Amino acid sequence: MDTNSSNFIIHKIEDDINSNKYSEEEIITRFPPEPNGFLHIGHVKAALLNYNIAKRYGGDFHLRFDDTNPSKEEQQYIDSIIDDLKWLGLEFDEPYFGSNYFDQMIDYARELINKGLAYVDDQTGEEIKQNRGDLFSPGKDSPYRNRSIEENLDLFNRMVDGEFQPGEKVLRAKIDMASPNMNLRDPVIFRILNGKNEHLNKEYHVFPMYDYAHPLEDAIEGVTHSLCTLEFEDHRPIYDWVLNNIDDFKEKPPVQIEFARLELTDSIVGKRYIKQLVDEGIVDGWDDPRLVTISGLRRRGYTPEALQDFSEEIGISKSNSKVDYKMLEHFVRNDLKNKAKRLNVVLNPIKVVITNYPDDQVEELEIETNMDNPEMGKHKIPFSKNLYIEASDFMEEPVKKYFRLFPGNEVRLRGAYFVKCTDVIKDEDGNIVEIHCTYDPETKSGSGFNKRKVKSTIHWVSEESAVPIKVNLYDNLISDETFDSNNFIENINPESKVTVTAYAEPEILNTLPNEKIQFIRNGYFNADPKLFNKDNLEFNRIVELKSGWRPPKKDKK
């Protein structure tokens, strides 16, 4: 985050600093994922926002796992979240866990009961739901709402001790069944679950609900500003109610501030959707490069710098909106432009024979590894009589303004020579087998030849030294953005992953796993960190070269 930038969250924090409510060093923020899945692009914005605000003021940032639902939480998710956040550039001490405070939360529930602000309800979940009312009518009091403090304490303690079965009883906050905010209509704050908390390796019979646990976790840790996405705005009154009724936190409770979540076009963002894709085997795990999980983006080849720049550009807003996926692609192109090697790789080959080139001759041509970054040096590429070019770089009957190779036309082979198409060889079915060309030896790149010009330069690889590689070409995972939980599987794009065998220049053999390379004129590709090895040269297309998004013009000062 730009340390000079400002927004409504910064304004609130600085008001609190200027009023001496907090010093800068006292500012504490947190990122509290539930360990029930891998992080996705939407979490990037929230994590970086919380981290960068704490860093801006010299305060503390907490990674806290909200592990209040034992049926959905797994250690693999905890490990992946830590790994992804560190890759993203966040630095933090040992993570916090909401479960560390379970015993305190139980004690605070007893405090609420003693104040007449919580009661044990014997209604079923369906009965509670029916009696809550709706936006146009108030709810109905539970028949158990006026139990005595003594009876509520006894029943709650027996819940804690495991005397009752799940669904038999719950503990509810006693607020207002007629409140226009449905979240204040006596929300459940503890339910019975006979489960084991993996972090504590301890069995519990009651588990706190999120709306109760969240404010207490923040307050216990000393969080000053609890930054949440807009869907929690209607939950802020219960957040404040909990803290205002617990004696330990009345003096200086954390303040919740909401901001717009990140949603991308042409992508599936949402753990439940992603989990279904993983569980049904439609994608290759949580790190499938077609997913916008952080792990998927990493495997595809996105960089932390690109995600940081993207997050900075979209900024902080109070209004939900969708961000064009092309904007994210712009930032990865921008980041890789001066970092990635640029190699000749032909994805869809067609053979070219240079008829006037010596049969057994092989030249070692020297070309720059990245024309925009001379510091990356040069490397050699073999050139010979038989080559491969992209099939799209030849057209037997060219359309208007087609300047690449066609009969009678001359083009430059990148880093090599001018060649002119003289003949097209076809098989008995009329399919093109090879293209015959002649070359002009005086036109070698770097020779200073300027007697004539050509309008097109194309890439190539020598047939004899070409290295076959496996290339995964990715497209949008969904065909229609108007999906919901009932139909989104039907909208999966069958062409979202197409795998081809391509041919690369020999320099490709020096590639390391997870190395990013620009395949000249085709895009940026990543050596799959999970599958790439010397026996399996597998690459994932990160993004094509052409950008469909441009950053807004800055106002001149």
Image: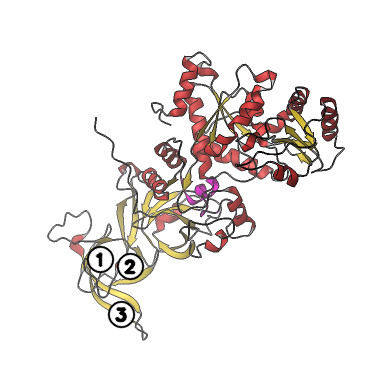
Of circles 1 and 3, the one toward us is 1
Q: Assign the N terminus to one quadrant of the image.
A: top left
Of residue 139 and residue 106, the one placed in the foreground of this image is 139
Q: Residue 157's x, y, as percent?
A: 84, 30
Residues tagged 1 and 3 counted as in contact (Cβ below 8 A): no
User: Residue 404's mark?
Assistant: 1
The residue to which callout 2 is attached is 392
Relative to 45, 73 lies left or right: right
Q: Distance between the residues labelled 1 and 3?
A: 18 Å
Q: Earlier in the sequence, mark 1 or mark 3?
A: 1
Q: How far apart are marks 3 and 2 (CA)?
A: 17 Å
The amino acid on which the numbered mark 3 sits, given as a three-letter code, is Ile
Q: Residue 485's x, y, as percent?
A: 59, 56
Q: Residues within 10 Å of mark 2 (few under 14, many from 20)?
A: few
The amino acid on which the numbered mark 2 sits, given as a three-letter code, is Ser
Residues tagged 1 and 2 counted as in contact (Cβ below 8 A): yes
